[in-house]
Image: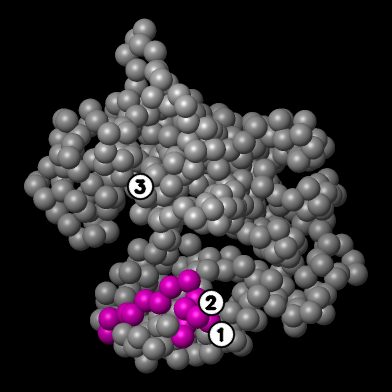
Amino acid sequence: MELLIVGTLEGQIGAASKIAFEQGGHVSLAEDIAPALEILRSGKAIELVMIDVKLDVYRFIQQLEQERINVLVVACGVANDTSLAVKAIKAGAKEYIPLPPDAELIGAVLAAATRENHALIYGDKKTENVLKLAKQIAPSEANVLLTGESGTGKEIFSRFIHDNSKRANKKFVAVNCAAIPETLLESELFGYEKGAFTGAVARRIGKFEEASDGTLLLDEISEMDIKIQSKLLRAIQEKEIDRIGGKAPIKVNTRIIATSNRNLSEAVKNGTFRQDLYYRLNVVNINIPPLRERPDDIVVLAKHFVKKYSELNELPMKELSVQAEEKLKNYLWPGNVRELENTIHRAVLMSVDDKIGEESILLNDEGSIIKKPEVGEEMSGGEFVGRTVATMERNLIIDTLKHTLGNRTIAANILGISIRTLRNKLKQYEEEGYKVPEA
């Protein structure tokens, strides 16, 4: 994760950033808004901006919107000033974080947030076979399509392919096609020239150029608008892109890895995905099995997450009890590895003994734990008779959102739908008068 810090935060952030660098963090610094915008225009893969609340947060966010720069902005300050916090949120910042004046603590937080951790942890034969295939095709120049349910770890596998390729010492750039609005995705991918549209006050390098000679991950490509697909197809075929407002094409040498949790061949039949683009991306297809189909990964991953979140929260290392392990193994994990990670993080925080007991493993709401049927046992649906599909869908979505404590991204991943679809559903429920858990 690349972090951009804008402002000085009364001198505290400078020392903290130095510590973050030393601990493996990736941090860029800008003293004011103007140099911060220059960094963002340059094509550097900034994913999070922390801006000093004393700067003009409103003007900064307005400029980002005008220039179609899609990045998460968090306002922060040394003092816990309520009026500044409210002002920052009203300006469009996603969050206000009052930082302590302890530079070492700030450094630890930044390092934890920005340090990349892409280790592949596994114990199941199916996962091993997928890795063998991924390693076999990694040195080639072929485009790769990774398919599988949400939360199975497609981005981790894509980084594994990049790290084992001839491009390993070049950039790996990821773009989440589902998280970026359609109106911004084109400029995010291809960049634009100064004056290309109102608000384009300077040239901006797109992700295709940034990843040239390296690898570009197009995450959840099925969510990409059909109009942008045609421009993407040309970029792949001709190995050149056109910046918005540009007068001449620009040569690029970018390897594409695309992921999808949907059936793209069905999308082709439905007319929502171009067939020629599908063939260009699907040179090599690697399907990642859901967690329920690789049961020997469950406990191995759980132990990894126990260690990770014990260290992150500065808690004593704990063990999973036999009962907790059994509870984990007997669950179907509709949200896959991402749901498992979230569950273990919560269990680490909730457990009070030296072992994590089954009572700390919270799976869905009480009484609705999904269990594997015994051999010969059929799943009964009698309790659902008389309810409409719309009612069942609404209950499932709202209950899942309660389970994730309002986290929309995690809920969408568990449900296997895009964040855009989830937001549309929630907006509909609110308009119909149903109470939706707050974000």
In the rendered structure, which disc, 3 or 2, sits on the residue that comes first in sequence? 2
Nearer to us: label 1 or label 3: 3
What amino acid does circle 1 point to? Answer: Tyr
Residue 403's disc number: 3
Question: Residue 297's spot in the image, x, y percent?
Answer: 35, 31
What residue span does the magenta drawing correspond to? 87-101
In-image side of 218 versus 322 (left or right)? right
- The residues bearing labels 2 and 1 have C-alpha atoms spaced at a distance of 7 Å
Q: Nearer the viewer, residue 152 or 375?
A: 375
- The residues bearing labels 3 and 2 have C-alpha atoms spaced at a distance of 27 Å
Tell me the element at label 2: loop
Is 360 magenta? The answer is no
In-image side of 289 versus 188 (left or right)? left
Quadrant placement of the C terminus: bottom left
Asked if residue 379 is positioned above or below residue 175 in the image, the reply reads above
Q: Quadrant of residue 22?
A: bottom left
What amino acid does circle 3 point to? Answer: His
